[in-house]
Amino acid sequence: MAFLTVSDRRRCYRPAVARNSRVKPRDNQMVSLSPTALDHFFAEPDDSAVVMLNLLQFHPDGGRERHLEYLKLAEPILARFGARILFRGKGLPALTAGDLEGWDAVMLVQYPRRSAFQDMIADPDYQKVFQVGIAAISDIVLQPLKQLHSLD
């Protein structure tokens, strides 16, 4: 089964874990995106760049190494869609109080428009490479960001 087809996203995605639950997917569960969130994201104006915040938790048994393999395979595909990695960093312990685990890694990926992200995740080459990516992670949050020039 393909990870995503633009024409029928609902059938290709499993329901997403609740946003702040931090419940870890089982090892055999596919990393999923919310069809409702995607529909809202793609329905917004496609007139400016968008940055995707990626919060990543790796599988303890070689997840970080598999993620590095995924990045090597994915970067040329990102470039083909005009996307680029702005920042990659290793997560350090969280400084806030509460029952929160830190993230193993954080990435900021810029896409020229929302449609570039949509086209990329529908691309058959990316879908194959993404299988390497999902084998690396036990949890992920993808948070789209739009640059503001003021907080008004």
Image (cartoon, rainbow, N blue to C red):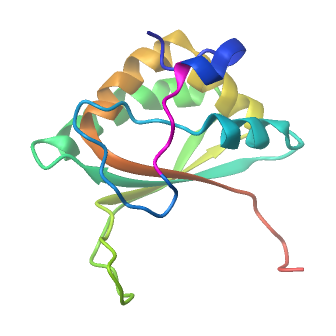
In the image, taking residue 50 as reference, residue 77 lies left or right, namely left
Q: In which quarter of the image is the C terminus?
A: bottom right
Q: Looking at the image, which is closer to me, 19 or 130?
A: 19
Residue at x 78%, y 36% (from the top left corner): 42
Above or below, 107 relative to 131: below
The image position of residue 127, as x and y in percent, is 46, 18
Q: Main secondary structure of the magenta part?
A: loop
In the image, taking residue 122 as reference, residue 22 lies left or right, namely left
Image quadrant in which you'd find residue 12: top right
Question: Does the segment drawn in magenta span residue 102?
Answer: no
The image position of residue 133, as x and y in percent, is 34, 33
Residue at x 31%, y 44% (from the top left corner): 25
Residue at x 85%, y 78% (from the top left corner): 150
Above or below, 93 relative to 66: below
Q: Looking at the image, which is closer to me, 117 or 134?
A: 134
Q: In which quarter of the image is the N terminus?
A: top left
Above or below, 45 relative to 86: above
**In this rendering, does residue 113 appear at all?**
no
Q: Looking at the image, which is closer to me, 121 or 47?
A: 121
Residue at x 29%, y 71% (from the top left corner): 101
**In this rendering, does residue 94 appear at all?**
yes
In the image, taking residue 121 as reference, residue 44 lies left or right, namely right
In this rendering, the count of numbered labels is: 0
Q: Write the start and end of the magenta stretch as one range.
A: 12-17
The image position of residue 54, as x and y in percent, is 48, 52
